[in-house]
Amino acid sequence: MDALQVFDFDREIDRSNTGSLKWDVKEGQLPMWVADMDFEVAPAIKEALRNRVEHGVFGYTVTPDEWYDAYISWWQRRHHFTMEKEWLIFSTGVVPIISSVVRKITTPAENVIVITPAYNIFFNSIFNNGRNIVECILPYNRENCSYHIDFADLEKKCSDPQSTLLILCNPHNPTGKIWDADTLARIGEICKRHHVTVLSDEIHCDITLPGTEYTPFASVSETCREISITCIAPTKAFNIAGLQTAAVCVPNEELRHKVWRGLNTDEVAEGNVFSYEAAIAAFRQGEPWLKALLEYLAENRTYAEAYIKENIPKLRTVHGEATYLLWIDCDSLQTDSETLTRRIEEKTGLILCDGCEYRGDGIHFLRMNLACPRSRLQDGLERLKKAVQ
Ligand SMILES: Cc1ncc(COP(=O)(O)O)c(C=O)c1O
């Protein structure tokens, strides 16, 4: 049977009055901003949670062995990277890990480097802890709407003795770019040379175009393995961010001890009964659902890119191979993206992310979340067309 027929991604689910960050909106508004999906989770996840609810006792919980096995076999099978059980530590989220690592691995007023534009909350984790945000801005090629890393700039920023941590987004939110093994190895060499630890946020790694794979940073060389702290989670791909379940993988023993102490001191290393159950069910039984989802998301991306090209020629799209986010170049409108998103919302009710929040050249970009039923995507694109006109 065609995988797309088994799971109904076309169904519009009313998320109002569920305490949803995304859907707490005014009448008639259409939120296409924050990175969560408007789809129901895989049946296996619902079933696992239902069974746990039925048990009826929800006392203090330890990380079960099945949790480690679920991560290890998923990464081995899907990402060709073998993690050892002791490399993994549970945490309540990727952002809690990042903030904790910033506090533990760096000291106040040191530099944390971010390759920008990048996921905006990285900046909060750095700034709120009194460290300096140092941007390594990705040069943008307007001819073919693509980005690449400026290695000379990265080397310069890393060579400052005040620089001690690099936060990498792999694959990259917001552009959807998958960094190849050579790029990752080069980043690793530069960081190693200048004693900079790499935190690789790989939360989006399971959302790639069908037939496309991402490369775990720690897998490309011994150097990358030894200097890296990798954040992974089922939350983006399986749409369970509200269950607060993530993991950090640190192969190097000394570094791992520090990370572990940091997470424990910050009290973000213990899960609740549902966070373990959901992660285990996702990685053990969620693959057919994910396969169908990736096909649906790829069609959404193709649809959105073609629609914008034909109907809103003033906008251009950056073709991402990962994430369900579309990075839209609005430079020709000659309005900064903050003003533009505000006007789009006022005129049409469509809520997009303002690219300025991602720094780098984000002032010329909008970010649209494509993870919704096709009918909703069509509605969003029509509103965008109306607003631009
Ligand atoms: C790159 C990236 N990291 C982390 C997060 C959030 O992770 P968590 O909900 O586990 O804190 C997001 C959410 O959009 C993200 O895009």
Image (spheres, grey):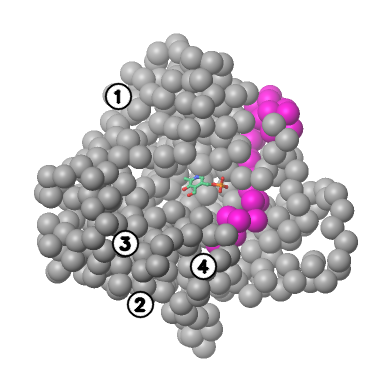
**How busy is the neighbourhood of tag 4: few (under 14 within 10 Å), some, or many (20 plus)?**
few
Amino acid type at image mark 2: Ser
Residue for badge 3 = 350
Residue for badge 1 = 153
Amino acid type at image mark 4: Ser
Residue sitting nearer the eye, 200 or 47: 47
The answer to whether one can see residue 381 in this image is: yes
Left or right of residue 235: residue 300: left
In the rendered structure, are the residues bearing label 2 and label 3 in contact, judged by CB atoms less than 8 Å apart?
no
Amino acid type at image mark 1: Asp
Residue for badge 2 = 375
Q: CA distance from mark 3 to mark 4?
A: 16 Å
The first of marks 1 and 2 along the sequence is: 1
What range is drawn magenta here?
A: 238-265
Amino acid type at image mark 3: Leu
Residue 351 % position (x, y): 34, 57
